[in-house]
Amino acid sequence: MWVRLRTDLLAKAGAVAAGRGLRPVAPHPARRTERGRSTRLVQGLRGRLPHPRERGTDTGPSPVDRRKTGSKHHLICDGRGTLLKVITTAANVNDVTQTLALVDGIPPVAGRPGRPRRRPEALLEDKGYDSNPNRDELRKRRILPVISGKGAPNIKGMGKLRYVVEQTFALLHQFKGLAVRWEHRTELHDAFVSLACSLICWRRLKKHDS
């Protein structure tokens, strides 16, 4: 039988009962906890995983509840919902700032004879992405920006097309490890995002073949 404190292993119960006690005191005392942070085990040692609310790279105040920190995903997909690029940023990063990064991050898409395509003919975005500088940059890339302006009526059929993007977000966040971020390091989180995107695309191909 072992003595445990939550998930931390302390010692064998028999050894404590025999009077041998616990191990000697650590040579270096534990550092004081930073203000606003709960007590945790030292990073890198076996023990508890960091809590989703803990600060890490690419995290920031939540627009909904600024007492909490978090991250969010920005994605670009084709008209059928196939994921092309996903970017992880802090929760308080404005969506419009990631437009060009998403477009430039599209990998070569092969299929038809000739050079693999890297850029779409048009880019559909909602009013949250309304930005004249972004429109100019998209036109320089020979991409037609289809963006509803703030204060203007929505483009006809926008809701139906927007549903494709919302459905793609739902598919990505069906993986609990992505809906709630547990990884402290962004590169580890993005690795799981890439794996999830591969699984989503593989399932679509499998469904299409059947």
Image: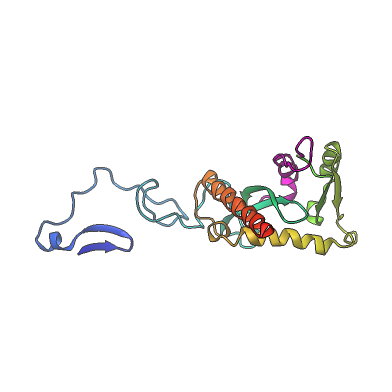
The answer to which of 125 and 203 lies nearer the viewer is 203
Image position, residue 47 (x, y; %): 35, 54
Give coordinates of residue 158: x percent, y percent: 84, 61
Q: In which quarter of the image is residue 113?
A: top right
Residue 94, can we see it?
no
Picture mark count: 0
Q: Residue at x 85, y 36 (%)?
A: 140
Q: Position of residue 193 (x, y in %)?
A: 58, 50
Secondary structure mostly seen in the magenta stretch: loop
Q: Is residue 110 part of the magenta span, yes or no?
A: yes
**Which percent across, then down, holds residue 81?**
72, 56
Figure quadrant of the C terminus: bottom right
Residue lying at 75% horizontally and 51% vertically, measured from the top left: 78
Q: Can residue 103 be seen in this view?
A: yes
Magenta segment boundaries in residue numbering: 93-117
Residue 72: quarter of image: bottom right
View extreme (left): residue = 18
**Is 77 one of the magenta-colored residues?**
no
Can you say whether 91 is above or below 139 in the image?
below
